[in-house]
Amino acid sequence: MNYFLLTALVLLFASSLCHAREIALTFDDAPTPDSALMTGAERTRKLIDILVKAKVPDTLFFVKADYINKDTQQRLEQYAAAGFHLANHSYSHQSASELGLLDYPADVYKAHLLLKSQKNFLPYHRFPYLHYGKDLAAIIALQQSLTDLGYKDGYVTIDNFDWYISSLLTKAAEDKKTLNYDNARKFYVDTLYESIEFYDAIAKKTLGRSPRHVMLLHENDAAALFVGDLIAHLRAKGWKIITPQKAYEDPIARNFPNTVFHKQGRVAAIANSKGVPESELRHPSENEQYLDQAFAKAGVLVDL
């Protein structure tokens, strides 16, 4: 083969690896209780319908195990029956930084006892609030404790405040306010997409490539209403939706950063471990006051 043609092909292949634009969707806090907008059962049905219709190959629902009861157990079984997987998000959803080296693993194990026999359970663990421990020594010790329990780190690379966006929608419903769903949809999609591009840009600058990303979402009303629109927008922008299992095969899964800063996910933590200050590693929308103002400006609430 012509040398210059071969070189061009190699560069093209390398470029495709550097800019993979692949992303997996994961949902925390399942099975979230009823809200003013919808029941938990409705939320589960909506999410399954959206994910199946969008042909999402798989997702992980990180379970807050003290939410499990006779009724919510059926919802977990519905996710599994649809081909999706469950993982461990602790029992009581308390910060590992506050519970400490003994109580936090005990809390995770309490959840494990309820989850290990669930259909489609995978041994991934995600820390509530992305709090990995109060200091580096505690973080290392907790990682070892979770490894001893047979768990892999269910890290994220794309952080956001989707939970707060959902709370704004739910609060409006509680207050009997009318929502402009088209504006709400645009607000949700635009805000989350900006965070995706933000953390991907950090990855490219820090790693020299776009890794297989893991997006943090929550099993909440906003997701049930609009995650299908987010998926369509991602694909329109050249992103491919992959399974979390495939995303966790990325080399950064084996690159646990030597830093206390994990709150914004693995990519931000790696960047911080290389000297990037925390102030540059949080998207502006990860702020309640910012979102309050943006929510009002977006015209989500209808003035009657």
Image (tube, rainbow, N blue to C red):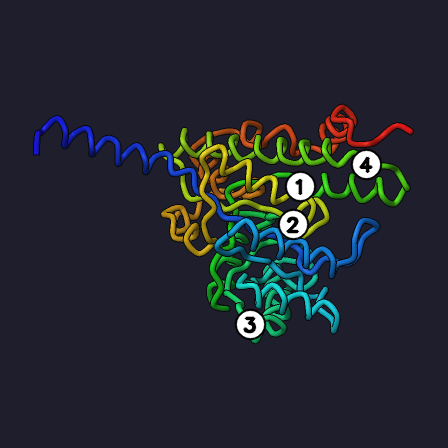
Quick one: label 4 or label 2, which is nearer the N terminus? 4
Whichever of callouts 1 and 4 sits on the residue coming sooner in the sequence is: 1
Q: Please, what secondary structure does the residue beneath circle 4 have?
A: loop
- Precedes in sequence: disc 4 or disc 3: 3
Q: Looking at the picture, does residue 157 appear above or below residue 146?
A: above
Identify the mark at residue 179; answer none if there is no mark: 4
Q: CA distance from mark 2 to mark 3?
A: 21 Å
Kindly identify which residue carries mark 3: 119
Residue 162, disc: 1
Foreground: disc 4 or disc 3: 4
- Label 3 sits on a secondary structure element that is loop
Residue 24 percent location from the top left of the image: 49, 48
Q: Secondary structure at mark 2?
A: strand
Does label 1 or label 2 sit earlier along the sequence? 1
Q: Residue at x 63, y 61 (%)?
A: 63
Q: Nearer the viewer, residue 253 or 200?
A: 200
The span from disc 1 to disc 2 (Cα, nearest Å) is 7 Å
Q: Marks 1 and 3, Cα distance to the nearest angstrom?
A: 27 Å
Q: Position of residue 125 (x, y in %)?
A: 54, 59
Identify the residue under disc 2. 218
Q: Mark 2 and mark 1 in contact (Cβ < 8 Å)?
A: yes
Earlier sequence position, callout 2 versus callout 3: 3
For the residues labelled 1 and 4, the Cα–Cα distance comes to 17 Å
Q: Residue at x 40, y 36 (%)?
A: 210
Q: Amino acid at mark 1?
A: Asp
Question: Taking 149 as reference, is 253 above or below it?
Answer: above
